[in-house]
Amino acid sequence: MNRAAPRVDLFDVRPDDERAVALARDLRVIEALLFTSGAPVDGAALAAHLPEKTDVDALMEILAADYARRGVNIVKVAGGYMLRTAPDLAPVVSKGAVETRKLSRAAVEVLAIVAYHQPVTRAEIEEIRGVSTSKGTLDVLLESGWVRLRGRRKAPGRPVTYGTTPAFLVHFGLDALQDLPGLDELRGAGLLDGRIPAGFSIPLPSDDAGLREDEEPLEKEPLDLSLAPLLDYAERDGDDE
């Protein structure tokens, strides 16, 4: 009967094994940085705390493999690394958690259109959906932090363009927009039926945060002083006395 080889403890090393000691220290540094961050930590941020020319990707593979058996895993999302609850334990930690309001069907549809078609305007969203989209639906997505205002389309009326945020990637466990499901995956999940039109395709989303040629920056909102408190008459005329 073959027994499984004992798992090596990466952090329990002999003091005289300099290479193992250095590796353990680097892994502990990464572990601490991930633990204290509530947002994804990218490779450059990790490398800044490690010896020069450290292979961060190799260290992350080692640490992620070690964490794979734990209740907390290391995952790559939004171009960085995070500690997240193991998927099989999600029902356990969700008990007693504050229930968040679910998005309406319209909000889900708009979010999907923004994710796949960004940068996209409200009029373009309505054209794709085939129905009008209320401003409230977009406001909900903006407040969620999953959608942002990108810029303005260089077109009559200069309509605002919308795009997704890193928070969108983090929430849905995506490293990049390219990880969104494609046509075959959507069909396999039952989200598309077999009667889709010939030539129908899913656009390839892009993570490029820069403005496109047909976009221009959002102008800064002018300072609104209409609600500023007025000075007392005597105070306003005090310098004239």
Image: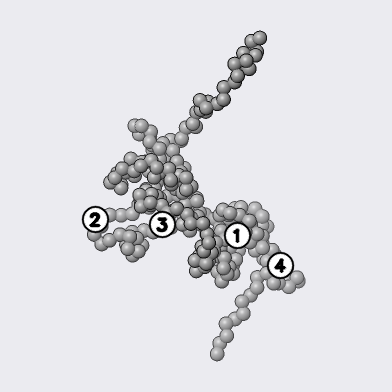
Closer to us: mark 3 or mark 1? 3
Classify mark 2: helix, strand or loop.
loop
Q: Which residue is mark 2?
A: 197
- Residue at far right of view: 16
Q: Which residue is mark 1?
A: 56
Q: Earlier in the sequence, mark 3 or mark 1?
A: 1
Q: Earlier in the sequence, mark 3 or mark 2?
A: 3
Classify mark 1: helix, strand or loop.
helix
Proximity of marks 4 and 1: CB atoms separated by less than 8 Å: no
Closer to us: mark 4 or mark 2? 2
Three-letter code, disc 3: Leu
Q: CA distance from mark 4 to mark 1?
A: 17 Å
Judge the density around disc 2: few (<14), some (14-19), many (≥20) Cα neighbours within 10 Å: few
Q: Which residue is mark 4?
A: 21
The answer, for residue 58, to whether it is visible in the render is no
What label does residue 180 carry, if any?
3
Classify mark 3: helix, strand or loop.
loop
Judge the density around disc 3: few (<14), some (14-19), many (≥20) Cα neighbours within 10 Å: some
Q: Earlier in the sequence, mark 4 or mark 2?
A: 4
Three-letter code, disc 1: Val
Please state which of residues 1 and 238 is positioned toward the viewer in this rendering.
238
Three-letter code, disc 2: Pro
Three-letter code, disc 4: Val
Q: Earlier in the sequence, mark 4 or mark 3?
A: 4
Residue visible at 30% across and 59% down? 192
